[in-house]
Amino acid sequence: AIINFGSINIDHVYQVDHFVTPGETLASNHYQTLLGGKGANQSIALAMAGADVRHVGCIHENDASFKQTLIRKGVDCRFVKCSDTPSGHAIIQVTPSGENAIVLFGGANQTITEKMVEHALDDAKSSDWVLMQNETSCIKEAMQQAKKKGLKVAFNPAPMSESVKALPYNCIDLLIVNETEAAAITGESEIDAILNHFTEKWGHARVIVTLGKVGVVMLQKGERTEVKAFSVEAIDTTAAGDCFIGYFLSAFASHADARQALIRGCAASAIAVTREGAAQSIPEEKEVDRFLAK
Ligand code: ADP
């Protein structure tokens, strides 16, 4: 199984003519609520890719319908706790040209406790993976407990923050970053310097750097595997990374063929960027199979 300690957000999406300016009250004539959060998106991508995924997280008890959405997608939600803390949410303004401006409130995502981590890992097997992003509390504890139990740890430090640098990097088996996160962690800006830094300093782990429409590079034991992105007409790249991670990790956890898993991740995310939205843009496994058969 893949045990994902992840955020569950409610995205409140408002269409606006322009971003609200200081002191302005701006009317919006279109509003939608969607399930979001990098954690939930990655759990959905994992489930769509056929993985056995257990989500560990918290939401407000009035938002239990969002937990049902995850369950319908095939995610095991026994460890999603409903409490009286407001759910994590994002207030998203979208302009006619598709630009967005976002206010993010962590809420219940920040109420994951060490006890919850312990409980969720209680019956874990040594073949299980633990996954986390940077949108929940107790990331460090989850990494350390997972390591102690001999589980494999995958970490996607998104969104990047200063606190990431204080995490126990030696507990990480697989680091998955985009270019921005890679630059922040290594302190380098050029891709070659970034990859050299990872090769020298991250020999204990596998590292994947996703490079948007260029593709992806994976480093393991001094060896580089590169896979080009599929050429598609992208209309919305929201959750491209989450979709990649879910499809990659589902494949890699089941057969450990890195190149095949990278190709599946790239194919799934190439489909996702041709569709609008976050979780709803993640394709089903059979669509990915058809795409790859072409
Ligand atoms: P993030 O969404 O985390 O910033 P990236 O932008 O690096 O991550 O995208 C993740 C993966 O999604 C890429 O490695 C690539 O395979 C795929 N992808 C992203 N943008 C495109 C695109 N325009 N065309 C094809 N594939 C894309």
Image: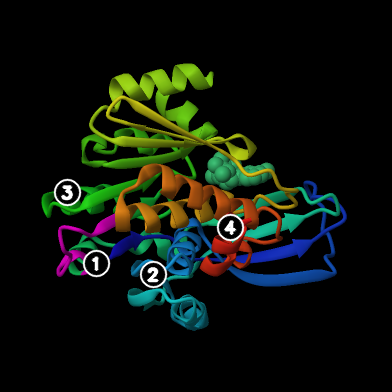
Of 176 and 11, nearer the camera is 176
Q: Are marks 2 and 1 in contact (CB under 8 Å)?
A: yes
Choose the circle earlier in sequence order: 4 or 3.
3
From the image, give the main secondary structure of the stretch colored magenta. loop
Q: Amino acid at mark 3?
A: Lys
Quick one: SS at disc 4? helix
Q: Say which element carries label 2.
A: strand
Q: Which residue is mark 2?
A: 58
Reply yes or no: does residue 129 show up in magenta.
yes
Which label number is shown at residue 147?
3
Q: Nearer the viewer, mark 4 or mark 2?
A: 4
Instruction: Mark yes or no: residue 187 visible.
Output: no
Please provide percent x and percent y for residue 100. Answer: 72, 50
Q: Which residues are magenta?
A: 120-130
Say whether mark 2 is within 8 Å of ligand 1: no
Would you say 80 lies left or right of 19 here? left
| Residue highlighted by disc 4 | 293
